[in-house]
Amino acid sequence: MSKSEEWCVAGKAVIEEEEEEEEVRIKVGSYGGLVKLVEDASEEVMLLWGLEQPTFSKPNAFVNQSSLTLSLDAFGHSLSVLQSPSSLITPGVTGSVMWDSGIVLSKFLEHAVDTKCLLLQGKKVVELGSGCGLVGCVAALAGSQVILTDLPDRLRLLNKNVDTNLRTSNIPGSALVTELIWGDDPDPEILDPLPDYVLGSDVVYSEEAVGDLVATLQQLCGKQTTIILSGELRNDEILEYFLEAAMGCFVIGRLDQSELHPEYRSHRVVVYILVKKPEE
């Protein structure tokens, strides 16, 4: 039996137990809906693999990574996102194309604003690991002042997509592109004032990066900051490692699939909302 199959069996057992015990659902941060409180990292991963069974869902359901562009409508605007499929052959470079988690998060933002569960108008937003920049562009279309960040060698494509989609006079928000290396001190414009929201899609991808990611999330978060992270369910061990590290300083809630955009849901994608724990 493979590790994923073991998780599925164990996850089903956890589900049966939770059916007997009522799930703890809470309000987290500025999100108006309720989320499932994550209290144990190992149990959460077993539950996800048992409940969602991601290995049986179609990957890349909303994207075509061989195409040079991806089109998506959001907030009454048609976005055209440039991709660089040839960059995928470079080890470690995954942000040159879109992934389902970015689409799911982008459309969740639109859906949550439309249903009055999120207010992004006039809010400061920092996106981590922006890649092609779709999530940050959608936040700007919602009226946010967005800072899109990534590694220095990833900014060229990011700038192109921001210029292509947001350099018009009828955009309600704004967008600025800058570099940010996790674990390093962010530029003053990122920290002052601290953002209302921190967004990220597929930012949990290796155990080596988890420590720096969590450190950066701590730096960016004040009492009013809400973090929204989406990710594809690929590696159970890495997700568990991140959850264990983050639970030390953040309250974590998982969105139910029913809270996502009805046409952009995937059993391979999970969305978490985090807020910093109050200081004791």
Image: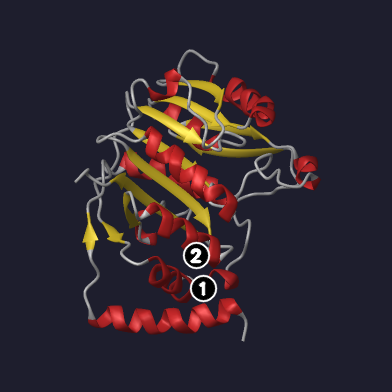
Q: Is residue 164 above or below residue 66?
A: above
Where in the figure is residue 147, as x and y percent of width and height?
Answer: 47, 25
Specify few, some or many for label 1: CA neighbours under 10 Å numbering under 14, 14-19, or 20 or more: some
Q: Nearer the viewer, residue 91 or 54?
A: 91
Identify the secondary structure beneath mark 2: loop
Identify the residue at the far front of this view.
Answer: 280
- 273 on left or right of 160: left
The chosen color scheme is: secondary structure
How many numbered marks appear?
2
Asked if marks 1 and 2 touch (Cβ < 8 Å), the reply is: yes
Where in the figure is residue 4, as x and y percent of width and height?
Answer: 57, 76
Quadrant housing residue 216: top left
Specify few, some or many for label 2: CA neighbours under 10 Å numbering under 14, 14-19, or 20 or more: some
Quadrant housing residue 110: top left
Where in the figure is residue 248, as x and y percent of width and height?
Answer: 34, 53
The type of residue carrying mark 1 is Gln
Q: Which mark is residue 53?
A: 1
Q: Nearer the viewer, residue 220 or 111?
A: 220
Q: Which mark is residue 277?
A: none
Identify the secondary structure beneath mark 1: loop
Q: Nearer the viewer, residue 245 or 57?
A: 245
Q: Nearer the viewer, residue 37 or 261?
A: 37
The type of residue carrying mark 2 is His
- 145 on left or right of 90: left
Which tag, 1 or 2, sits closer to the chain's start?
1
Q: Which residue matches tag 2?
A: 267
Identify the residue at the far top of this view.
Answer: 169
Where in the figure is residue 145, as x and y percent of width and height?
Answer: 40, 22
